[in-house]
Each structure stands twice: as structure tokens, then as C-alpha cells.
Amino acid sequence: REEDILKGMKLSGVIGYPGLMEQLRAEKFDAAFAESMDFCGPVVINLLGIDKWAVTESMAIRDGGFQVTQTPSTPSYVPSLMAGAGEEMTFFRRLSNTISFAMMDVMLDTLFVPKIEEVLRVRLPNLPSINDLTATNSLVFYNSEPLVDFPRLTSARIIDIGGITMSSGHSSLNQTWSDILDLRPKTIFISFGTIAKSSLMPEEYKVTIRETIKQFPDVTFIWKYEIPEHNISAGIPNLVESTWIPQRDILHDPRLSAFITHCGQGSTTEAIDAGIPLIVIPVMADQDRNAYQVERNRIGLRLEKSDLSSLGKLENAIREILSNESYRKNAIKVRSLIADRPFPMKDIFIRNMEFLAKHGPLRQLDHYGRHLNFIQYYLIDVISFVVLVIVSILAIIALTIRFVLRYVLIRKTKRD
């Protein structure tokens, strides 16, 4: 694929930039960390001769990737990033979830990685495979908050640091935004992030949102909308639009009543940290999974984006979130859990990286299971053997009983 070749060319350009690699080697870094899905980090780290390094994942979980995490996927109850399901799954949901976990490795190993390696080997003919390089990591940091995320199998190599940036805090709103939140008794903030822009959503979705806002004249709606020329707030006195909004500061303001969001990882984490009830409308990627987390923790309501194609469902969700105090109570409870955790995520990350730099590489954390094939790892051969033995024993017992009965019947027949 063209983008894979371009990514390989960019990395090749970085590696071939005059003096850059020599300058980096001269720094004599003690340790390093890199995003595994970018593929560039493991290659550069290898070229710099750094053997004490960790993988960082921007997502809460990685579909597949056993060679990276050394932790098996459990699609029977752990939702994948892309399957769009909660932990309670029907047979077909589990089937879809399993395929989603498996397909990630297939796509990476057949479509992405080979193309990048092809470009890199023009400059680095002896380059090991990117998968082999990535597998040399000692630790894996996930952008997951275990007190909110779906419970999953883990190991000593896996360290959750979800919400690591929340320790940077927030500021009080300036007078302009403060005055806006004072306009009405309740205020709802609407934002669909920076990638799925509100200005690009289907017109019928915009109509639904506008008409729904009109049903709540006593509620101020603040909508992050990217193109002022659309005049999205025209004729709606309780709608305030802005191309930029101090999201974290608004979320932490006690006058905010709810947050309507696409449920991206960053926005969801910020809302949970602020203890704000949510109405989530996932658009793509991991947002469905995040939305089911919100629903599981009872801190908000989940809608499908198709629900915006007609009036009714969004209005009902807003009425429910404003009238039912349980969502706010649950949101505050979850916020309290996270705030009172024994160790801040930032400290966990720093201390583990310092430990890795001092004592790594931590090959003690590598388990032998990574050398086993699928049949051995999941004991399919052992289970098959046990089943065969049991079936054989039952067959012998059945044949013995049959032989004894037949022998008894024959003797009886002869006597008669």
C-alpha cells in the first residue's frame, strides 16, 4: 500500500539523514520507549544499540500482538478495539470479536510490515524483521485505566498507565467562558474531537442536533464546531458555537451538567477524571469499545451514530441524563476511585522506566510460552490426548461389558 511505502520512506529518510544517528548514539541513552504500531521506533532503537526499552501503546488494548506483549488475547469476554462489543457477547459477537483480534496480526504481517521492510532494506540490507525487533521489548505500557476498563488477562510485563496526563491539572475558566456557563441553570458540552469534525458530519445529523437543542430552552449547549461560516447556531439562542474550547477546564467546572462526545480515548479519560456524566456517540476505531466501558460503569448513555439520523433518541438521552442523578453519582464515584489510587500513573511510568534503565533488559519477565506453537500453548495436544485416553478407556469398558454379557447369554442359551 502507498501509505506503508511512504512510512518506510520517511523512516529511511530519518535513518539516512546525515549525522543524525551518530548524534543520537553519542547521547548514550540509558533506555528508550516507543509506540509499537508506528514501526519506526523499534528500528531506530535497534540501530542505536539500546537494549533496554519499552513499548507504549496509545490504545487501551492491542488486538493480537502476542509477540509484542507475550500475553494471549481472550476474545471470549474481552472486547477487541474494532469489534464494537461489550463484555457480554452472543455467539456471533464472540465470533466477530475473535476474528477482529486475529485479523490485526494478519493485516500487519501481510500488508503493512513487509512493505516497510522492503523500503528499509534498500538502505539496511541486514535489518532484522520489524516483528523480531519489537519482540525484544522488556515492558509494555497500555493507555488503560484498570478501574474503568474491561478486566483482562495480564502479566508482569504489562503496565497500565491510562490517564497519565491527568496529573497536569486544569485551570479556572476565563471570564468569557464563565459567563457562558452562568447563562442558564444547566449546561451541556458537545464535541466530536479533532478527527471526526462536527462540520463534516451528514447534514441530517446536524439537523437532529439543532432541533434537539431547541427542545431544551433552559439548557445552554456549547458545541465545538469548526467552520463559523456554517452559522450552525443561527436562530438558536441557547446554542454557543466555537472553533476552540478549553475542554479540560470546562469539564472540571461544577456548572457543567453533561458531555456529549464521540468517546475518543482522550476525551473519555478527561471526562472520567472530571466526574461528568456522558452521552457517547462513537464514530470509529476504539470509540465503540470506550462507549461500552462508559455504559458498563453506569456513568453515561451510549447511542449509535445512526441514532442522529432522526429525532427522538438524542432528546430522550439528554432528558435521562439530566433527570437521573445516578449517572452523576456514579461518575463522581469513579472519579474518586481513580483519584485515590495508591500510586499515580505518572509515578508508575517513571519508576518502571528508571528500573528498566538500571536493571534491564528484563529478560526474567519473558515466559517460555512465547516459543510454543498454537497447539502447544493452548494444550490442544494434551486435551486431545486426555480425550483419546478417556474415549479408549470407555471403549474398553464398553467392549468388556459387551463381551461379558455376550458370554453370559451364550452360556445361558446352551443350558437352555
Image (cartoon, rainbow, N blue to C red):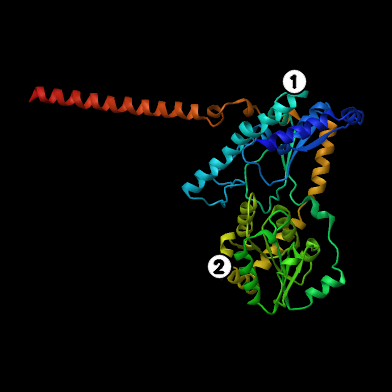
User: For this rendering, which residue is in front, 291 or 379?
Assistant: 291
Q: CA distance from mark 2 to mark 1?
A: 57 Å
Q: Is residue 23 visible in the rendered structure shown here?
A: yes
- Residue 310 bears which disc, if any? 2
Classify 277 as above or below 33: below
* Helix, strand or loop for disc 2: loop
Task: Residue at 45% x, 26% y: name it.
Answer: 385
| Residue 389 at x, y percent in the picture | 41, 26
Amino acid type indicated by mark 1: Pro
Instruction: Name the residue rendered at 49%, 26% in the picture.
Output: 381
Image quarter of residue 187: bottom right
Q: Look at 56% across and 51% down and name the residue there.
A: 85
Quarter holding the N terminus?
top right
Q: Is residue 304 visible?
A: no
Name the residue beneath numbered marker 1: 125
- In this rendering, is residue 210 above or below 22? below
